[in-house]
Image (cartoon, grey):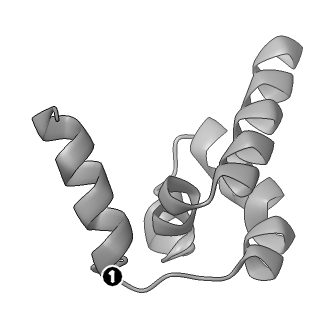
């Protein structure tokens, strides 16, 4: 087993080391989070826990990546 795979598995078992929000809150704040990032603001400070959730939730991460791609295509 690769070190990276082991680290990922341990992270999933132990859970986040910082505050995390749930999927509902993530989806509600995702537009704002991306807007802050695109504007060059500290989105992680403005919306604590959202990045942690995105790292651990494939569905929310996919939505985030789609939104980032959409915003990138418009600029």
Residue at (61% x, 60% y) in the render = 57
The residue where tag 1 is placed is 18
* The quadrant where residue 71 appears: top right
Near mark 1 (Cα within 10 A), the count class, few <14, some 14-19 or many ≥20, is few
Q: Nearer the viewer, residue 19 or 56?
A: 56
Q: Nearer the viewer, residue 40 or 73?
A: 73
Q: Position of residue 60 (x, y in %)?
A: 73, 56
Q: Is residue 70 left or right of residue 61?
A: right
**Picture layout, residue 55 above or below residue 65:** below
Q: Is residue 18 left or right of residue 30?
A: left
Q: Secondary structure at mark 1?
A: loop
- Please say whether residue 39 is visible from this viewpoint: no
Residue at (27% x, 79% y) in the render = 17
**Picture layout, residue 61 above or below residue 23:** above
Q: Position of residue 72 (x, y in %)?
A: 75, 19
Q: Nearer the viewer, residue 42 or 73?
A: 73
- Please say whether residue 4 is visible from this viewpoint: yes
**Quadrant assignment for the C terminus:** top right
**Quadrant assignment for the N terminus:** top left
């Amino acid at each position: 087993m690769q070190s990276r795979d082991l680290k990922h598995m341990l992270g999933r078992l132990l859970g986040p080391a910082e505050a995390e929000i749930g999927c509902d809150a993530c989806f509600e704040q995702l537009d704002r989070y991306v807007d802050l990032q695109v504007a060059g603001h500290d989105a992680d400070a403005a919306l604590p826990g959202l990045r942690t959730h995105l790292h651990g939730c494939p569905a929310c991460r996919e939505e985030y990546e789609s939104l980032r791609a959409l915003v990138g295509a418009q600029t």
